[in-house]
């Protein structure tokens, strides 16, 4: 398997396990699938969630920051929800459960990534300015999953739903996709470009 899934911080995993074990947390979650599932639930495939902090035409390297860790919540053979954790002054803590199209899309992207030849460290990269979430396949498999910059040869796989004109589940080298994203975010130019092909 060419994916080297990084281990999540132990307190983040413990906080998700505690939330799954709390009837109140599960009952109050806005996730009908999580509330209605029968049988045991387990957090799997922890992925660090990075946010693209700055992207622009300046040509500088894009900045990312770690926003949390996401766990897919599995019931028997499929993921039914996800759990996000966040870093607080007291350490890693459970944030919330959620469901939606990004759950199945993440699973699909991970399955597709397992078939590629090079080895990668999977991460999630959120691009808030485009309302876009990608599977970030980082080429340095030994890197600290909480840090690191986008390398030009890393792969980004947009998850569905992707912005108009950007194909979901198609891997793009950072060096190829970054200019497209930059053009879409540039003030005064984002409107017409949103509908153009990537």
Image (cartoon, grey):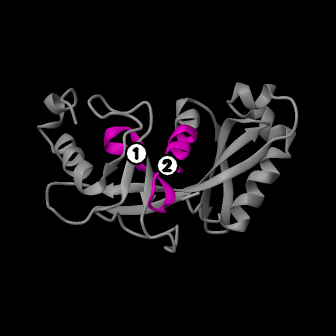
CB contact under 8 Å: marks 1 and 2: yes
The one nearer the camera, 10 or 173, is 173
| Marks 1/2: CA–CA distance | 9 Å
Q: Is residue 104 left or right of residue 179?
A: right
Residue 103 pos. (x, y %): 58, 36
User: Residue at label 1?
Assistant: 157
The one nearer the camera, 22 or 147, is 147
- 114 within the magenta span: yes
Q: Earlier in the sequence, mark 1 or mark 2?
A: 2
Q: At 86% from the left edge and 29% from the top edge, which residue is drawn?
A: 38
- Residue farthest toward the left in the current orientation of the protein: 188
Q: Nearer the viewer, mark 1 or mark 2?
A: 2
Q: Which residues are magenta?
A: 106-133
Q: At 42% from the left edge and 54% from the top edge, which residue is drawn?
A: 51
Q: Is residue 50 left or right of residue 4?
A: left
Q: At 25% from the left edge and 66% from the top edge, which residue is drawn?
A: 61
The one nearer the camera, 130 or 135, is 135
User: Residue at label 2?
Assistant: 113
Helix, strand or loop for disc 1 = strand
The image quadrant where one finds the C terminus is top left
């Amino acid at each position: 398997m060419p994916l080297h899934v990084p281990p999540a911080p132990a307190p983040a995993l413990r906080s998700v396990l505690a939330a799954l074990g709390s009837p109140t947390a599960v009952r109050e979650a806005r996730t009908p699938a999580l509330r209605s599932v029968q049988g045991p639930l387990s957090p799997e495939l922890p992925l660090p969630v990075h946010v693209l902090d700055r992207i622009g035409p300046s040509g500088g390297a894009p900045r990312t920051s770690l926003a949390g860790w996401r766990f897919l919540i599995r019931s028997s053979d499929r993921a039914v929800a996800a759990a996000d954790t966040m870093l607080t002054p007291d350490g890693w803590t459970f944030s919330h459960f959620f469901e939606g199209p990004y759950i199945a899309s993440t699973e699909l992207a991970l399955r597709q990534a397992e078939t590629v030849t090079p080895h990668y460290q999977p991460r999630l990269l959120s691009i808030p300015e485009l309302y876009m979430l990608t599977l970030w396949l980082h080429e340095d498999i030994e890197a600290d999953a909480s840090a690191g910059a986008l390398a030009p040869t890393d792969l980004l796989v947009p998850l569905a739903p992707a912005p108009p004109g950007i194909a979901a589940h198609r891997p793009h080298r950072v060096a190829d996709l970054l200019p497209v994203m930059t053009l879409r975010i540039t003030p005064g130019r984002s409107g017409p470009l949103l509908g153009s092909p990537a």
